[in-house]
Amino acid sequence: MPLTSEELTVIGTLGGAFIVALSTTIISIVNKRSEEKKHFRELVVKTASEHWLNVAQITTATTMPPLTDYIVHTVKMCDLALNNKLTSENVKTKLHEISNLMDILNDHAKNVSKKV
C-alpha cells in the first residue's frame, strides 16, 4: 500500500520535529553540564582565594604556599567530599593521595622560589 503525499508530508514533518527536539535536548544537557562545571570552578577558585587570604593575614611565616596550591587542594577536597563512591575504607587512601600530591606541589614551589 503506497503512501499518499499527505501522509508522506506528515511523516516527514514528524520526523523533522523529532530530530530537532532530540538535538535541542542534547544541546541543553551539554550546556547544563558545562554551566555546572563552570560554577564549580568559580566556587573553588573563590573559596581557595579566600582561604589563602585568611591564612596570609594570620600567618607569621615569611613564606607561604602559592595560591595555586590552595586551589588544587580545594579541588581535590571537593572531589573527595562529593564522591558518591566514598566509603570509610577508601577515605584514608584518598586523603593519603591528596597529601602526597600536596607534598609534590610544596616541593615544586620551593624549587621555583629558589630559582627566582
Image (tube, rainbow, N blue to C red):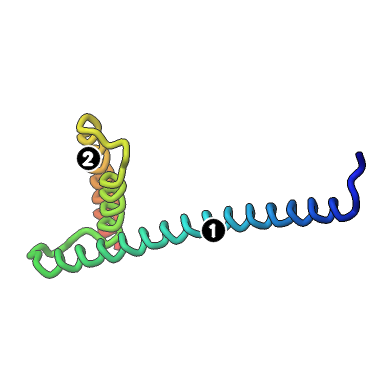
Q: For this view, does 9 lie left or right of residue 82?
A: right
Residue occupying the point 7% across, 65% down: 60
Image quadrant in which the N terminus is located: top right
What secondary structure is marked by label 2? helix
Residue occupying the point 9% across, 64% down: 59
Percent across and percent down for residue 22 are 63, 52
Percent across and percent down for residue 29 are 52, 54
Q: Which of the two residues, 82 or 72, is positioned nearer the viewer here?
A: 82
Residue 111 drawn above or below residue 92: below
Mark before the other along the chain sequence, 1 or 2? 1
Q: For this view, does 31 lie left or right of residue 110?
A: right
Image quadrant in which the C terminus is located: bottom left
Q: Which mark is residue 28?
A: 1
The furthest residue to the top: 89
Q: Which of the two residues, 104 or 38, is positioned nearer the viewer here?
A: 38
Residue occupying the point 24% across, 33% down: 87
Q: Which of the 4 image quarters holds residue 74? A: bottom left
What secondary structure is marked by label 1? helix
Percent across and percent down for residue 58 are 9, 67
Residue occupying the point 58% across, 57% down: 27
Tag 1: amino acid: Ser
- Give neighbour class at mark 1: few <14, some 14-19, many 20+ (Cα, 10 Å): few
Tag 2: amino acid: Leu
- Give neighbour class at mark 2: few <14, some 14-19, many 20+ (Cα, 10 Å): some
Q: For this view, does 40 lie left or right of residue 7?
A: left
Q: Which mark is residue 108?
A: none
Q: Which mark is residue 95?
A: 2
**Mark 2 and mark 1 in contact (Cβ < 8 Å)?**
no
Q: Which of the two residues, 10 or 102, is positioned nearer the viewer here?
A: 10
Question: How many marks are shown on the rendered structure?
Answer: 2
Give how far apart the Cα atoms at labels 1 and 2 are.
Answer: 35 Å
